[in-house]
Amino acid sequence: MNRSQRQARRITNVVVRFPFLWPLLRVRMTKLFDDVAPQWDAMMSAERLVAFEAALEHVPGEPRAILDLGTGTGDAAAALAERWPAAEVVGVDVSREMLAEARRKAPQLRFEVGDASRLEFTDASFDLVAMNNVIPFVGELARVVRPGGHALFAFSRGDETPIYVPPDVLKSQLATRGFSDFADFAAANGTSLVARKRREA
């Protein structure tokens, strides 16, 4: 890993354990992505969505409202819109510069600046929230996923991904917030996880 990647890993490790520290680290992480946004696509492997798309194969039904959280330059949002053309897909990212690239590449899609720890969506807004190489804020995620809906987490280089959360940590955090039916996947060098939010009794 280079210096920026190591910094992203350190921030990820801290925030996953201590989410309340995110406001202190958000500016640093945002700057990391703002700085690399113009070169991002050239830097990324052609396989960066392989694990993400492998997990999409196992999302049941036809989600109508989909959030691509940490959308970056929008490739995952575009993949979601292609798979489910009738769905309303919104991509959210904390980096304005990354979103500028996303809007340039996919002007037909909806992209918004937002913080994954405090999303500006009402409760139970989405059938599917998808994340590719993103720090998960599981409490906020549980708030915006509808009962019976799904959350998807993908890490394009498995545990070598700078922003990475081990599956056992994810499952533990998700289980305490009403998620179950976990399914793990591996594709190319990446890993992914799909979880379903339990329906209310």
Image: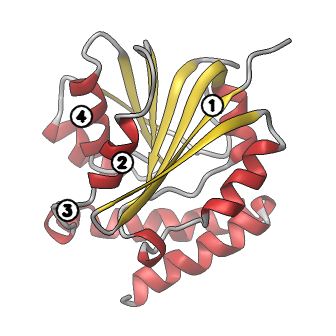
- The tag on residue 38 is 3
- At mark 1, the secondary structure is strand
Residue 78 visible in the snapshot: yes
Q: Which label lies toward us, 1 or 3?
A: 1
Kindly identify the amino acid type of the residue bearing the numbered disc 2.
Answer: Phe
Query: Residue 106's quadrant in the figure?
Result: top left
Determine the CA span between mark 3 and mark 2. 23 Å
Q: Is 27 on the left-hand or right-hand side of 83? A: right
Callout 3 secondary element: helix
Q: Position of residue 107 (x, y in %)?
A: 18, 29
Is the N terminus in the top left, top right, bottom left or bottom right quadrant? bottom left
Quick one: label 1 or label 3, which is nearer the N terminus? Answer: 3
* Residue pointed to by mark 2: 52
Q: Are marks 3 and 4 in contact (CB under 8 Å)?
A: no
Residue 185 coordinates in the image, percent (x, y): 44, 53
Q: Residue 138 sits in which quadrant?
A: top right
Amino acid, disc 3? Pro
Vertical position of residue 171 compared to residue 157: above or below = above
Q: Which mark is residue 78?
A: 4
From mark 2 to mark 1, how far is it between C-alphas?
Answer: 16 Å
Q: Which residue position is annotated with label 1?
A: 196
Mark 4 Cα within 10 Å, few/some/many (few <14, many 20+)?
A: many
Question: In the visual, does 77 lie left or right of 19?
Answer: left
Image: 28 above or below 139: below
The local crowd at label 3, few if under 14, some if 14 to 19, many if 20 or more residues have their Cα within 10 Å, is some
Under mark 4, the amino acid is Ala
Dots 1 and 4: beta carbons under 8 Å? no
